[in-house]
Amino acid sequence: MGHGSLTVVGTGIQPVAHTSTQAIGCIENADKVFFASSDALTEYWIRQVNPEAESLNGLYDPSIDRHKTYERMVQRVVEAVESGLNVCFVLYGHPGVFADPAHEAIRRARNAGYTAEMLPAISADACLFADLGIDPGNTGCQSYEATDFLINRRRIDPRAALILWQIGVIGEQGYKNDLNAWNREGVRILVDVLLEQYPADHIVTVYEAARYVCFEPVIRNVRLDELPNAQISAISTLYVPPFGQAQTDREMVDKLIASSTTL
Amino acid sequence: MPLIAEYLVHLGRHEEACQAFRKDPEHAMECFGLTKEQRDTVLSGDEAKLGSAIQSEFHACASGIAPSMTTKITRM
């Protein structure tokens, strides 16, 4: 038995189609594979690649605080590493985005002296940029989890694009397995806050990446003030396009030009 | 064999299969062997319905019952 190691990989948003060759190789060659995915196709496919793969989905329980669920996941994964196995931990999307257990498992494995790494994968924002035809390099792009955006009163620049994640579960603490169980009142509160900086008729987009290769993404354009009446699910993301144009700082431009010519 | 899952894995692995699906989904799925009911599920655009159908096929295969004989669909 080897010394033990941990590799955390993601399947991307669409299992198989979005999963990198490198990630597939890790799943295939690992001594032990753990995966956390509520998607039946992902489960089927991962078991095809590595029949010894073990689901951690059973640890989810709507009556338990999700942090406790994550702690149990981390313990299972790290214990396997400590037993000397080369472990692959598979998560949906990008394993490092909205995935506390992935970062925590790596931190603990490293602290215990084991090799641990994370491989990048396709995340929802990558799909959003492609599906909505947005280049985040043009105006800049601000990105917040919706509840975090509200409770921490994050400051935004409306002249840059804004992405708000998980607008359907604003204020929710636990885990829900019903995509339609979303918090409409939370969306009303979010809209009130956004109306402080955007006009009511600003067109925003409710977005959901296609989770299956045979589906199209959900793209619903609505007026900001009508967002609470829009069809939203627990996995919806809100894209708010820039409003207004940034004023170029001529003094800064001159300073940068001067700095480049002094080379 | 859970045919819907097999077909989606096939689409994920082969870009030409994806192109054939986008061009004529009914024909592409029929050639793969999907029944009318399975094709309708794939084309429904309903993520929950598709997930349930895949899950149902697993249970059917595990218990030796043909997928078409299953009626109860459970959500994950």
Image (spheres, helix red, strand yellow):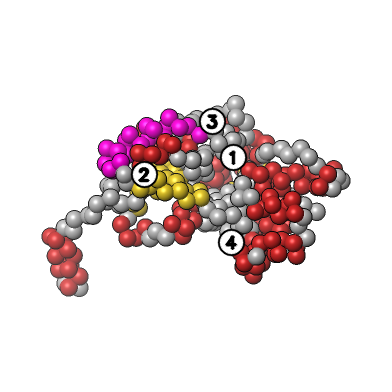
In the image, residue A191 lies in the stretch drawn in magenta: yes
Give the CA separation, mark 4 to mark 2: 37 Å
* SS class, disc 3: loop
- According to the picture, the residue beneath numbered tag 3 turns out to be A174
The kind of residue on which mark 3 rests is Gly
Query: The disc numbered 3 marks a residue on which chain?
Result: A
Chain of the residue displaying label 4: A
Q: Is A138 placed left or right of B34 in the picture?
A: left
- Disc 2 secondary structure class: strand
Q: Which of the two marks, 3 or 4, is nearer to us in this view?
A: 3
Marks 1 and 3: CB-CB under 8 Å?
Answer: no
Callout 2, which amino acid? Arg
Q: Looking at the rendering, in which quadrant would you find the C terminus of chain A?
A: bottom left
Q: Residue drawn 24% across and 52% down? A: A244
Residue occupied by mark 1: A74
Q: Return the mark for residue A20.
A: 4
Mark 2, residue position: A223
Residue A174 visible, this angle: yes
What range is drawn magenta here? A182-200
The answer to the question of whether label 3 and label 4 lie on touching residues, with beta carbons closer than 8 A, is: no
Residue A11 visible in rendering: no
Query: Could you say which quadrant of the image residue B74 lies in?
Result: top right
